[in-house]
Image: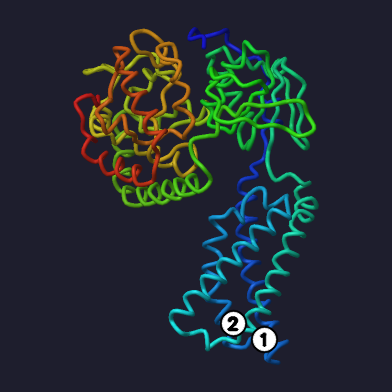
Amino acid sequence: MNTQPGPLLKAVEPDLVERKIAPSRERRRLRAYILMLLIDAVLLHLGFALASLIYEGVWWEKRSMLAAQTMLPVFFTIALYNSTYCVRALSDWIFAARKALIALAISAGLINFVAFYTKSNAQFSRISVTLGLLLAALALVTFRRLVPIIIERFWEGRVRNQLVINDGGPTFSLEKCTTISAAKYELDPTSHDPFMLDRLGKLLRNQDQVVVSCPRERREAWAFLLKSTGVYGEIVSEPAHTLGAVGVHRYEGQERTTLVVSTGPLGLRARISKRAFDFTAALAGLIVLSPLLAIVALLIKLEDGGPVLFVQRRLGRGNQFFDMLKFRSMREERLDQDGNRSTVRGDDRITRIGAFIRRTSIDELPQLVNVLRGDMSVVGPRPHALGSRANSKLFWEVDSRYWKRHSLKPGLTGLAQVRGHRGATEQEKDLTDRLQSDLEYISSWSLRHDVAILFRTIWVLRHENAY
């Protein structure tokens, strides 16, 4: 991929892009899964309650309901692992019914196995339990048949956001998808212009699947960009190993094959757990540190009367811009919005209180608000200013892999920071060392790793390169 920055592509009207930003369906799907879990629990209980009424003439007979309540947690455990609650289950009722019945059958078998060895079978009526299972199975299948009808009624049948980008390649379309022209939005995969990448990042926001149709000579560049934005991406193409394809998708009814070139670094469960950790840690941090934050804000204000916070545009997830918050540590008239000049030891732009809060990393604490907003994570690759340079080169000119570090949200701290890669980037190696740590963090992410990095950060708050 070309490592030279292409022409600036800022001409597209912002409103044009905003109108194409898809609403998030992931949150809708998550709510749908939770609702399905609750309804399944009710249906399982109703099946056994009705069975006890039919066979024993008693509604909600205690022994029958005990069997249902014992089976329910086992059913949910198996159902969550066998994809009973997944995207396909919202649109394909036969698939959904099959998965639910498998989970019900396995849970019934396991409960019966345990009851046999604990000699508790005699406590349950075999006919009542069997009838309860049959009625519950019938209810689960009926409910699965209704789900796609409800989805069609309220979601217009769209359970996923699908985007097709036409960049001059073979004709390609998907049912109920959004199709855009790369030329209309001035999307050039060979350019390293951050404004174009921000525009692309906004267009890909909330997309569950992105398919690009482009000429052969542009496929490698598009594959690189899709990997960098952290989305599930495909390229209409015959197999080509140079794209780094991770799978092949054949579409029925079309003489087209796509190569899956990116899947995003984290799955749904991982994203939920990471976001929960971020929100909890950031909220706790703001509450515990609120006296310190108030004192620092007061000292900054008293020193020169300028603003307490410094707001700077940084590159975030999907190469999108966001406004990062910091305590102001420089004189108001010397602020560097684009980060064109790196801070050096004894920098004459730094105020007295600014020197202290930079040395102790207190200036970064307002970014806890960015974490609560969802712009950042507690742990992740540190966000950089647009004008940041290493050896007089823009960061993406040093190594084109730089854009891949933005497939996750930027962090308040990160693996590079706890390894001591901080301060000015005077040499190219200063950047490549950080980039290597960032890419390593992304490829091996785990919640336990995040917790470990957070605790290790305590020992590097003061650092010889923090100035």
| Position of 240 relative to 56 (above/below) | above
Rendered image coloring scheme: rainbow
Count of numbered labels shown in the rendering: 2
Q: Which mark is first along the chain, 2 or 1?
A: 1
Residue count near mark 1 (Cα–Cα under 10 Å), binned few <14, some 14–19, many ≥20: many
Say what secondary structure mark 1 lies in: helix
Left-right relation of 73 to 451: right
Real-space Cα distance between discs 1 and 2? 9 Å
Q: Position of residue 357 (x, y in %)?
A: 26, 33
Q: Which residue is mark 2?
A: 65
Q: Where 41 sits versus 169, above or below?
A: below
User: Label 1: which residue?
Assistant: 52
Residue at 41% from the left image edge and 49% from the top image edge: 277
Residue 272 position, x and y percent, is 50, 48
| Residue 308 in the image, given as x and y percentages of width and height | 38, 34
Query: Residue 37's spot in the image, x, y percent?
Result: 61, 63
- Crowding around mark 2 (Cα neighbors within 10 Å: few <14, some 14 to 19, many 20+) is many
From the viewer's perspective, is 112 left or right of 253?
Answer: left
Q: Are marks 1 and 2 in contact (CB under 8 Å)?
A: yes
Closer to the camera in the image, 265 or 422: 265
Residue 125 lies in what quarter of the image? Answer: bottom right
Under circle 2, the secondary element is helix
Task: Name the residue rendered at 49%, 30% in the picture.
Answer: 407
Name the residue at 39% across, 36% down: 444
Observer-nearest residue: 30 or 135? 135
Q: Amino acid at mark 1?
A: Ser
- Quadrant of residue 52 within the rendered picture: bottom right
Q: Amino acid at mark 2?
A: Met
